[in-house]
Amino acid sequence: MSTKIMSCNSNRPLAEAISTYMNLPLTKADVRRFSDMEVFVEIQENVRGEDVFVIQSTSSPTNDNLMELLVALDALKRGSANRITAVIPYYGYARQDRKSGPRTPISAKLVANLITAAGAHRVVTLDLHAGQIQGFFDIPTDNLFAAPVFQSDIKDKFGDESLVIVSPDVGGVVRARALARSLDADLAIIDKRRERAGVSEVMNIIGDVSDRHCILVDDIVDSGGTLCNAAEALMAAGGLSVSAYISHGVLSGGAVARVKNSPLKELVTTDSIKPTNAMLEADNMRQISIASLLGEAILRIAESRSVSSLFNYNSSD
């Protein structure tokens, strides 16, 4: 059983970078739309009995990209692939992981059911919004962490300077604490009150940030409101500078303009989501690649080796 990697259309550059890392060409496939915008996938080489990894982030346009993934999984299943792994660097709908009120859906669970029903035998993803989404799948799920990639970049950027890792909300403390421990830095937390969806108000900072370089850590930046308000609060509290390291740069609406005009020295995201032109042109935004991380994880899964040993600390501590 040989390994094949296939890409849909949501993030072709990342798939090509993974292909280069693994020294394995992308499987020939035609992923296109009919004139009425129905998705069509044709695998153009033999996959019978093969171990196939499909790379597709379900980022905006979320439903189109999700449908591409589902149709590709079905095509591989009907092509008699022996094992099919959905590699989803950014898992869309992850924020709908619980009922937010009466008569509301748990869409993250629905998407998990769809992926399993379409034919996936395994899922690989990166920094899920909530770790318990792994339990929504009844198939093996590997949730990778961008923290080692961020850690080496922060060390290169800041060296021995005085740092404080900041969680922009109470929910992200576990992620921030793990990174702070690996960098031997202090931890601070921002306590915020959200008046309504997409609008956040910074209240107070728990921890000492004065005369230090502040590094905000989170899994998703969407509207950018929380980050920009947090940056303003940290600078007002005496921080030397504020940078942000975020796993997934969703950056919807006017987020890029908001970040450009904020006190943020730099917003660093992974390339789990393909960057827009506006993001590429912004002076204080850049992406670092997770291709080697995903490529190494795929190699280890294909060879039935440990994936967790990629990470030198336990993120659940």
Image (tube, grey):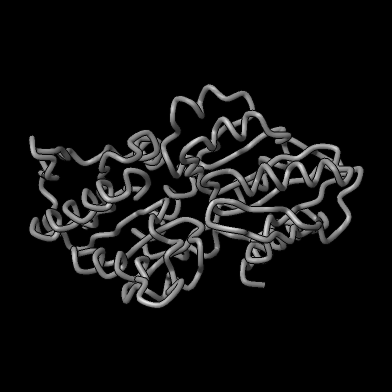
The percent coordinates of residue 311 (x first, y second) are: 58, 60
Residue 251 as seen in the image, left or right of residue 214: left
- Going by the image, does 308 lie left or right of 178? left
* Vertical relation: 234 (above or below) 133: above
Q: Pick out the residue farthest to the front.
A: 195
Q: Which percent across, then down, holds residue 131? A: 50, 69
Name the residue nearer the viewer: 292 or 7.
Answer: 7
Q: Position of residue 44 (x, y in %)?
A: 10, 41
Q: Report the number of discs.
A: 0
Residue 259 lies in quadrant? top right
Q: Is residue 171 above or below residue 221?
A: below
Q: In the rendered view of the protein, which quadrant contains the C terminus?
A: bottom right
Q: Quadrant of residue 175?
A: bottom right
133, above or below 210, in the image: below
Residue for point 80% across, 57% down? 204
> Residue at (86%, 50%) from the top-left corner?
209
Residue 41 visible in the displayed image: no
Q: Quadrant of the N terminus?
A: bottom left
Q: Quadrant of residue 13?
A: top left
| Residue 289 appears anywhere in the view | yes
Q: Position of residue 302 (x, y in %)?
A: 34, 58
The residue under the point 59% across, 31% down is 285
